[in-house]
Amino acid sequence: MDIPTDTPPPPSHVEDAKPTTPEQKRAARGATRPGDRIFLGLSRGSGIVLLLIMAAVAAFLAYRASVALADNEGNFLTTFEWDPAGVAHDGKPYFGIAVLVFGTIVSSIIALAIAVPVAIGIALFISHYAPRKLAAPIAYVIDLLAAVPSIVYGLWGALVVAPNLTGLYSWLDDYFGWTGVFEYEGGAPRSLMTVGILLAIMILPIITNVSREVFLQVPKMHEEAALALGATRWEVIRMSVLPFGRSGIISASMLGLGRALGETIAVATVLSPNFVINASVLDYGGGTFAQNIASKFSEASEYGRDALIASGLVLFVITLLVNGAARLIIARRKEYSGANA
Amino acid sequence: MSTVTIKPGGGHDTTPLKAARLPRWTPYAVAAGSLAVAVGIGLAAGLESRMQWGLIAAVLFVAVSYALAARVEGTRQAKDRLATSLVWVMFLLAVVPLASLIYETVERGVKVFDGYFLSHSMGVVADDEPGGGIYHAIIGTLEQVGLACVIAVPIGLLTAIYLVEYGRGKLAKTVTFFVDVMTGIPSIVAGLFVLSFWILILGFDSSGWAGAMALSILMMPVVVRSTEEMLKLVPNELREASLALGVPKWRTILKVVLPTAIGGITTGVMLAVARIAGETAPVLLLVWVNPFINTNPFDGPQGSLPLYIYQQYQSGTQAGYDRAWAAALALISFIMILNLVARGIARWKAPKTGR
């Protein structure tokens, strides 16, 4: 076939045309008529309002936190107590977040350790294994998991899941109790482990959805090349899908981590709080940032609320960093954004 | 390139073209077998938790299919089967909680779920006596969610319009990034923010309005995201045709772009509503508690459905648990119906992008 060499280049897209003079620039933005100017002002204003809200969240939390921290007699980072009313310290406030940091990190790690492999499995199932007709309904079921309110998860976790876990925990205690991590003394299993399991179920949808989007982006060529070389389905996935999707999986896990860190009411419902660090994840005790705020709030004085706000500020900064990092990793591949997951 | 000729009937015996394979029904048989064995073990060892039965069955299934395949088909095929069975097990692992959650909520919820429950408040009902209902909580939740929509939907819509129709440059990039980050704000932090500035600094009382403000912060990024996606789906030709007729850009957006995308935008807003209707943490901090009917969201504490569940659970009595499950059933049905309707609208009004 002849390829004509003298065809003119295709007309460039309207938006690609670079305006040069200020008048053209203004015309391109469509801001010449009063109606246009008002509309542009309104819509840009809303964008700015959004940014202002974010800034205000940080500013107000920081202000109230500074009020609380100024009078704190304990070390905010290393104190193992939460006593803003100073009951045990002659009326002087004494509180710190060490226990909360421990509980939050441990429960989130457990949640991620369970959720990430399962989520990758489900994402692969939807993108590569499921019969084609089943893929869409399954994706919908996963979305339903995301739609269940966290208080219902909490209720279910406390009244249905937790009573069912005693057997598993005793078994873990029998065989792995010697590690110290899996010691279980009996009693209601309202522990960090139970919280981790529940959080894993709750963050499953977001990790699944983002990874699935990435897996569907894998160039068909890569997969077909692997198949043509005689690879089995698993080898195709190992050689072409997983390497391509690695950054997506990482950012998906971080988005899930962000959710797990900030989950409040489900944790507050399931965990029986105890302000101590317990080496065993099966025995009750510990607490998380969000759970601590929810359960201490109703009895807190105004100063106590400021103290809780101080811990909330830490949570805010941590989730901001985790989410921001996840978004930056995703943004490197502009084709997919996990934001709508 | 040399050509390879295969002698008819010759090399067939030494290098079979087709390796030995397990019959197609093997996975099903193995699944049934491992389930049966797991139930047997569970009964024999007296494990009272169904969860353990399931885990044993899953482990057995994965191990047996690997061993069988390794025996008959070779290691590579065995690994493939291992991956396949693992992926299936993972999928079932995810479905089981959802099924159990819905089953338990319905089964335990229908006990006290009736017309009386929906039309009465808690009033003077004590924690441990039966009776009472969620009328006050439904009113509170509807008003709080409605107010949150009034704040969040215009801001969210306009921001999305800005990002898609106007936004180039640094401001748009910053807004996009922070909208993404905002989706990850824990709900309790949004609650703490409103608490610090509205209640602690400005000195107002807790009210439905305070809760609505926190909910709107959680709702905004979701609305922006979904609207943005929908506006991007509107074909550029429509905009260009309208602009070419001399219609100002703002009228083009209002009369051409938005109507085209309205189905998807409605869906996005409804999904956002479904998401915030179940939020407990900000309501817990800001709306406080009121067992009586309070229809004025601007004055004093109100009820709220998620908060009601939390409190009835915390009462620790059987009557409280029953009410908590019934309220959970009401909340879940509300959210699921919103979800289904939203998805229905999305399918019905999907923008025609095909050409």
Image (spheres, grey):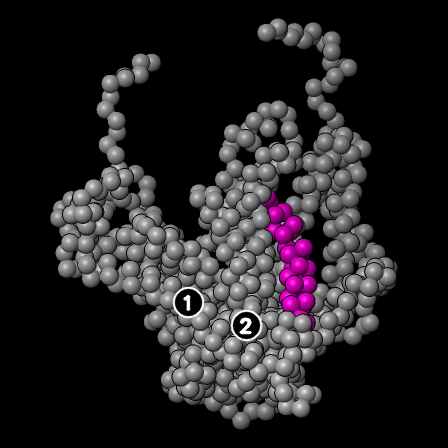
Category of crowding for the residue at label 2, using alpha-carbon neighbours closer than 10 angstroms: few (below 14), some (14–19), many (at least 20) = many
Q: Amino acid at mark 1?
A: Ala
First in sequence: mark 2 vs mark 1: 1
Whether residue A101 appears in magenta in the rendering, the answer is yes
- State the extent of the magenta-drawn residues as a range: A98-127
Disc 2: host chain: A
Locate residue B221, reporting x and y percent.
Answer: 41, 61
In the figure, B7 relative to B312: above or below? above
**The label number, if any, that marks residue A55 in the structure image:** 1
Q: Horizontal placement of B14 versus A17: left or right?
A: right
- A225 or B22: nearer the eye? A225
Q: Main secondary structure of the magenta part?
A: helix
Residue drawn at 62 percent across, 63 percent down: A199
Task: Give yes or no for residue B267 being in the magenta stretch.
Answer: no
Residue that appears at 19% across and 50% down: A26
Real-space Cα separation, disc 2 to disc 1, in angstroms: 15 Å
Question: Disc 1 on helix, strand or loop?
Answer: helix
Residue A312's tag is 2
Taking the image as shown, residue A99 lies to the left or right of residue A212, namely right
